[in-house]
Amino acid sequence: MNMYPINLKLEGRPCLVVGGGAVGERKIAGLLECGAAVRAVAPEATGTVAGWAAAGRITLARREFAPEDLSGVFLVIAAADDQAVNERVAALAAERSLLVNVADRPEYCDFYLPAVVRRGSLCISVSTGGVSPGLAARLRDKVAALCGPEYEEYLNLLAAYRAEAKTHRPDEAERREFLLRLTGEEALRRLEEGGISALRAYLAEEWRR
C-alpha cells in the first residue's frame, strides 16, 4: 500500500500520548520537538516524562486511559505497555476519525513515524511503512553521514538570499535561475570540498553576477 508523505504542522496542536514508559517518552520527545501541546496519560511515567510534566512542558494524568482523554485532540499515539490498552485507544480514535499511531502495531496505524534526520530547516525522513523500523534507522544514519551539521547553516544562507532576491531581483525568471544556481552541483561541491566558508564565497560570487 502506498503512503501519502506529508510534513505535518503540530505547533500548538493538542496531541495525546497514552503511555509514559520508555516508548511513550520517545514519542513525547518527538512531539515536543515539533512544538505540539502534549497531553500524556499513564499510571506510571519515566523520570524524564515526570520531569517534563513538573516543568510544565506537558500535561500528565497519572491514571489509566479513559475515552474522554480523546476529546479535543488532533492526533493520538498509543504507546502503553499493555497492547490491549493500545488496541482500545486505536478503536476509540477511529470512531472519532482521529489520526492514531500504535507503537509496534502497524495494522492499527493511520500513519507511521519515520526515522528522521534534522539539520535546522532540513528534515529528511525514512520510512519502511512500519515493516522494518530497524532498516529505516540504518538508512537514516547513512543519510545523516551525507548531510552534516553544515547543512543547517546552508539552509539559513539560502533563506537569506531568497529574501534578498525577492527585493533586488524582480524578474521572476532571473530570480528562479539565481536560486537554482545556489543549490546546484557547484554549490554542493564547494560545500563538500571546502566547507561552509567555501560555500559562502561561492554564494557571494553568484549574488554579484
Image (spheres, rainbow, N blue to C red):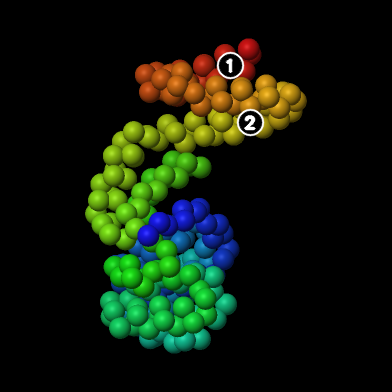
Instruction: Give the side of residue 205 with respect to residue 148, left or right.
Output: right
**Vertical position of residue 134 compared to residue 90: above or below:** above
Which numbered circle lies on residue 39?
none
Q: Position of residue 150 (x, y in %)?
A: 42, 31
Q: Is residue 170 visible?
A: yes
Question: Is residue 91 shown above or below 76?
Answer: below
Q: Residue at x 33, y 70 (%)?
A: 107
Kindly indicate whether the residue at mark 2 contacts the one at mark 1 (C-beta within 8 angstroms).
Answer: no
Instruction: Judge whether 30 appears above or below 144 on screen.
Output: below
Q: Is residue 51 visible?
A: no
Near mark 1 (Cα within 10 A), the count class, few <14, some 14-19 or many ≥20, is some
In-image side of 139 versus 59 (left or right): left
* Residue 203 screen position, x and y as percent: 55, 20
- Which residue position holds label 1? 206
The residue beneath circle 2 is 162
Which x, y percent locates residue 48? 35, 66
Which residue occupies the extreme front position in the image?
1
Question: Element type at marker 2?
Answer: helix
Residue 198: image quadrant is top left
**Residue at the location (35% across, 80% down)?**
87
Q: Amino acid at mark 2?
A: Arg
Q: Residue at x 25, y 51 (%)?
A: 135
Q: CA distance from mark 1 to mark 2?
A: 12 Å
SS assignment at label 1: helix
Q: Where does the image place residue 26, in percent across and percent down from the top left? A: 35, 62
Going from the N terminus, do you reach mark 1 or mark 2 first? 2
- The amino acid marked with disc number 1 is Glu
**Could you tell me which residue is drawn at 29 percent across and 68 percent down?**
104
Quadrant that contains the N terminus: bottom left
